Amino acid sequence: TADGATPGGPDGVVVPQGSAASVADRPEEDRLSPTSTPHINPQGAPIAETILLPGDPLRAKFIAETFLEDAVQFNSVRNMFGYTGTYQGRELSVMGTGMGIPSIALYSWELINVFGCTKLVRIGSCGGLTEGLALNDLVLAQAASTDSNYLAQFDLPGTWAPTGSFRLLDHVYRAAESRGITAHAGNVVSSDTFYHAQDDTTERWAKMGVLAVEMETVGLYANAAAAGVEALAMFTVSDNLATHAQMTPEQRQTGFAQMIELAATVTEL
Ligand code: HPA
């Protein structure tokens, strides 16, 4: 458009189109956005193989504006903003997923199976289930348990335990360690319910050593495993259900910035 807004971007809320040197200049046949889906319409804008996935599309926009260079917008369908640019010279995309397993599952399915993403990193917040998790600590999901029925469709002859990519997890864990950031790796539970009908729901998961509750990871991990690509989910602890501690909105922002930088280290792989 005349003011340099990116294709598909709603007026006034787009990042500058820029030159997107390394992504927009790729030969047509190397681009990973050959088509559109019901939920993602890149209109020819590229999507990188590595993508960060915050729940909130406005966080995707913030990340594109703050951390990416030469970002172009590749999606605005349903305001689920997605952007591609470079981070420290390497291609990186970022897109919102919405909340809940059905939402992250449909977006991640399309990103993996239609647009060719091979490294998907969810960045979000979680509710800590054990006293050992302080506010702002980082949780890396080794595996995701769930109360959802999402896994039933895979029709396995038992109970499947979707896991994250050890390679991505190990890389981010070491990056956190080297920056003096406390990281906990373990099981999380991806729940369909934020408000539970039974009082002891989260305590029962905590008793089994599950570190934290959130609402998306099992869908991402299952889709990634089914397609043979790598995924990782990482969270800052925004509240603790055992200690009743809660972050202030300002604390949420700080923890989030630190997590984005850690997540973006997977572009080194
Ligand atoms: N429940 C589910 N998801 C969450 C929570 C929670 O308490 N905190 C942050 N994400």
Image: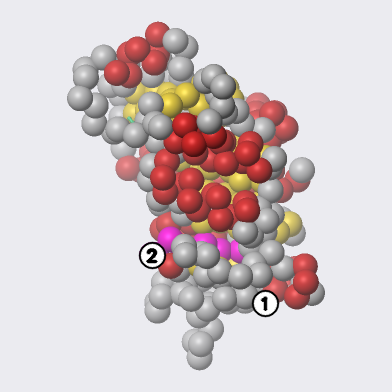
Amino acid type, mark 1: Ser
Q: From the viewer's side, name the closer residue of 72 and 177.
A: 72
Amino acid type, mark 2: Arg
Magenta-colored span: 78-84
Q: CA distance from mark 2 to mark 1?
A: 26 Å
Residue drawn at x 54%, y 34% is 154
Query: Is any atom of residue 236 visible in this view?
Result: no
Colouring scheme, one of rainbow, by chain, secondary structure, one colour? secondary structure
Q: From the viewer's side, name the closer residue of 261 and 241.
A: 241
Residue 161 sits in quarter: top right
Residue 240, position in %: x, y?
A: 34, 23
Residue drawn at x 62%, y 51% is 112
Residue where numbered disc 1 is placed: 19
Residue where numbered disc 2 is placed: 78
Viewed as shown, does residue 33 lie left or right of 138? right
Q: Are marks 2 and 1 in contact (CB under 8 Å)?
A: no
Query: Callout 1: few (<14), some (14-19), or many (20+) C-alpha neighbours within 10 Å?
Result: some
Q: Is residue 94 above or below residue 222?
A: below
Q: Earlier in the sequence, mark 2 or mark 1?
A: 1
Q: For the C terminus, which image quadrant?
A: top right
Viewed as shown, does residue 184 lie left or right of 199? right
Q: From the viewer's side, name the closer residue of 54 and 109.
A: 109
Query: Callout 2: few (<14), some (14-19), or many (20+) C-alpha neighbours within 10 Å?
Result: few
